[in-house]
Image: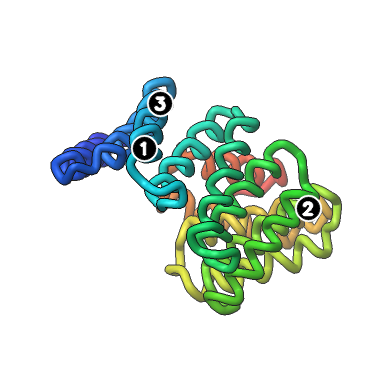
Amino acid sequence: PAGKAEARQFREQARSLYAQGRTAGALGTLASLCQGLGRYSRSEKLYFRALAIAESAFPPDDLEIAGLLNGLVVLHKYQGRYDAAEAWARRSVDLRERAHGPDHPAVAAGKAALAAILDAQGRFEAAEALYGEALDVFERVHGPEHHEVAVSFNNLAAICQTKGEYAEAEELYRRALAIKEKVLEKDHPDTALTLHNLATLLTTVGRITEAQPLYRKALEVFERRLGKEHPHTLVCREGLEALGGSR
């Protein structure tokens, strides 16, 4: 949930946008705030109002419309309304392709978001294909050692792990980890997330002595950076304790 300082920042941003005559942007900002506060019905209504205004004021491939579509994707995915999230995500990808062409990072990001929705529904083959398309663009545009490339490797690894393709999953997790350790700060939570994912994989294949130190390292970062009660921290601690490990 959004904290008081974050909520204040959202409100100030909305006021600024409204003062500039950017009503759709202001409503979209308030919609995002309501989502962060757990007021999902109100958030959805604000997004729909913002989208209606934007669609009447801007060309159909305007990026402000894309931003609002992405907000609806996140909202409906968070609620578990995957059919709705998928529909908005596909529309967002189509809009971005018309605005930028197929080989743009914004299009790749949209495909990765769509892939995450399909992944959550168990549609692994389709998700894997979209993650792969996104990875191709990120590597071509950003180079092989970029955070988006690492995130793509991590996501593909998770699908391989789910499908039982453990060797491929380990290779992808390690490639993701190597990039994150190089381009992010030393104790970044996103690096710890891949450490945790790799630890769960090693646990699955019975390599417990290799998994335990990865769990410990990830847990230290999660506790320090996210707090002891954060969901990532709790899941990581449970994984370590299940192996009989401790701090």
Foreground mark, 3 or 2, reads 3
Instruction: State the SS at label 3.
Output: loop
Residue placed under numbered mark 2 in the picture: 161
* Disc 1 packing (10 Å; few <14; some 14–19; many ≥20): few
Residue placed under numbered mark 3 in the picture: 38
Q: How far apart are marks 3 and 2 (CA)?
A: 32 Å
**Label of residue 56 in the image:** 1
Q: Which residue lies furthest to the left in this view?
A: 19
Q: Are the residues flagged by discs 1 and 2 in contact, CB closer than 8 Å?
A: no
Residue 37 shows in this picture: no
Count of marks overlaid on the render? 3
**Quadrant of the drawing holding the N terminus:** top left
Amino acid at pointer 2: Gln
Instruction: State the SS at label 1.
Output: helix
* Disc 2 packing (10 Å; few <14; some 14–19; many ≥20): many
> In terms of depth relative to the viewer, which is nearer, 68 or 77?
68
> In terms of depth relative to the viewer, which is nearer, 173 or 83?
83
143 in relation to 162, above or below: below
Amino acid at pointer 1: Ser
Q: Distance between the residues labelled 3 and 1?
A: 29 Å
Residue drawn at x 78%, y 53% is 161
Residue drawn at x 60%, y 29% is 80
Q: Is residue 13 left or right of residue 209?
A: left
Residue 171 shows in this picture: yes
Residue drawn at x 48%, y 44% is 70
117 in relation to 217, above or below: above
The earlier-in-sequence mark between 1 and 2 is 1
Q: Where is residue 191 shown, x and y percent of the image?
A: 53, 61
